Image (spheres, coloured by chain):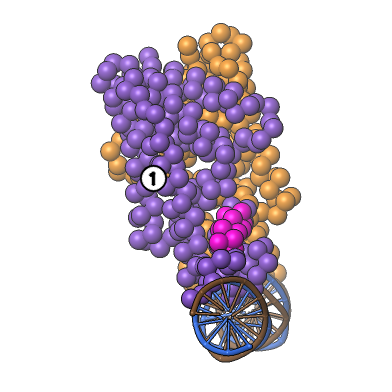
Chain colours: A purple, B orange, C brown, D blue
Amino acid sequence: MARTQGSHAEITGPRIQAAAQRLFADHGYAAVSMRQIAGEVGLQVGALYNYTPDKQALLVSLLEGHMHDLLDTWAALPQTVEPMQNLESFVRFHIAFHMARPQAVFIAYMELRNLTPDNFTRIESLRRRYEDALTTILDRGRASGDFHIDDAKLTTFGIIAMLTGVTTWYRDGGRLTPTEVQDHYWNMVRRAVTA
Amino acid sequence: MARTQGSHAEITGPRIQAAAQRLFADHGYAAVSMRQIAGEVGLQVGALYNYTPDKQALLVSLLEGHMHDLLDTWAALPQTVEPMQNLESFVRFHIAFHMARPQAVFIAYMELRNLTPDNFTRIESLRRRYEDALTTILDRGRASGDFHIDDAKLTTFGIIAMLTGVTTWYRDGGRLTPTEVQDHYWNMVRRAVTA
DNA sequence: GCTTGATCTGAACACTCGTTCATATAATCT
DNA sequence: AGATTATATGAACGAGTGTTCAGATCAAGC
């Protein structure tokens, strides 16, 4: 048998992913070479192909990991049926999750066009599933009379775009604490969906 | 003297810009080659360098043109001192302007990282000038008591992110007319800034 | 009709790209 | 100790990169 302990594959693999994530976020998928990624990890190019069949798979794995992380983390949170509370927890979760992973978020929103069509479809369906979670909350709140909204789908797009925008300006140690940011955005969202 | 009429430079120049804009928007700056751009226009690569010193200048020219277009078009609109009306016209303008130029908008938000530091600084200052226009409206409305907002800067980011997001889903001939889209977004923004 | 000069071609330059593979290294098992 | 095999090297492949430039093309001015 081959060695199962002492092998550095379990260390090298994640290190490659981390290096790819950082470089893709900073310079863009197309602008980053496999040699740059290898150099970052301290390997020669060829060694990367023990961990990924090609460059595209490296990107897909990052995107898919991020989207599943997003969906699973949200699904694991305790859910309320009370629409206003449910929306508030979605807003606070979305901001907190995105603030904590600026690189993954950046890649997930920027590099979709570098995916092959079938990979694009798979990632896109994961994103739609997440959007549907919010739309469902909005629909329930409208049905219960808690929310006054014209169009649940358009409101979903509006809210998510607004919240995700936090990653374009938020920096750790800035003027506002994460909780303060959540408070302000929740104020805006709450008022936007109530008359 | 050389010919000043009959020259196709005035035609070729804009055609190169248009081809670059379309290709950059579709595949990203780094993924597009000068040969692709030339091919789109029906030229050989070398001819491009009669119109741009290098690839980077092509991108900068697109970004700078877009930002000046944005600032100038807004400045040319009749302005009101009445905060609510002023904000409404900003919202409607922003949506209409961005819906009409999805490619330019996409590039302006995606390709900043492909700029050299000094080019980035120049483009970024133009963007800040635009954001300041909205912040000023919000500040005036807060001073007059028309708006109830926690933080004018954060509200600016929130509104602009929400409105710009329209380009990610809006398609000509879709379910909603441009005016309906404006109406819905204005409803959300209006409520978000009033108690 | 000849010169001028803007415009374009086609080839070349020096690199970099993603990917492959024979070979080397070293840790684990028998 | 020797065999096994996961992991890594280093060189090579063909193709594509941005940019340059001598020379061709051709419309306008004299």
Residue for point 61% across, 42% down: B68
Residue for point 56% across, 37% down: A99
The percent position of residue B3, horizontal first and vertical second, equals: 63, 68
Q: Residue A21: which quarter of the image? A: bottom right
Subunit that carries the residue with mark 1: A
Q: Residue D27: which quarter of the image? A: bottom right
The amino acid pointed to by label 1 is Arg
Instruction: Name the one closer to the observer, B41 or B8.
Output: B41
The percent position of residue B62, horizontal first and vertical second, equals: 58, 52
Instruction: Name the one closer to the observer, D18 or B73.
Output: D18
Quarter of the figure with the N terminus of chain B: bottom right
Residue bearing the label numbered 1: A127
Residue for point 70% across, 45% down: B122
Magenta-highlighted residues: A9-23
Query: On the picture, is D22 further left or further right than B187?
Result: right
Query: On the picture, is B6 further left or further right than A147?
Result: right
**Predominant secondary structure, magenta span:** helix
Query: From where the camera sits, is residue B55 visible?
Result: yes
Residue for point 48% across, 76% down: A1
Determine if the magenta segment contains residue A18: yes
Pointer 1 local density, CA inside 10 Å: few below 14, some 14–19, many at least 20: some
Determine if the magenta segment contains residue B17: no
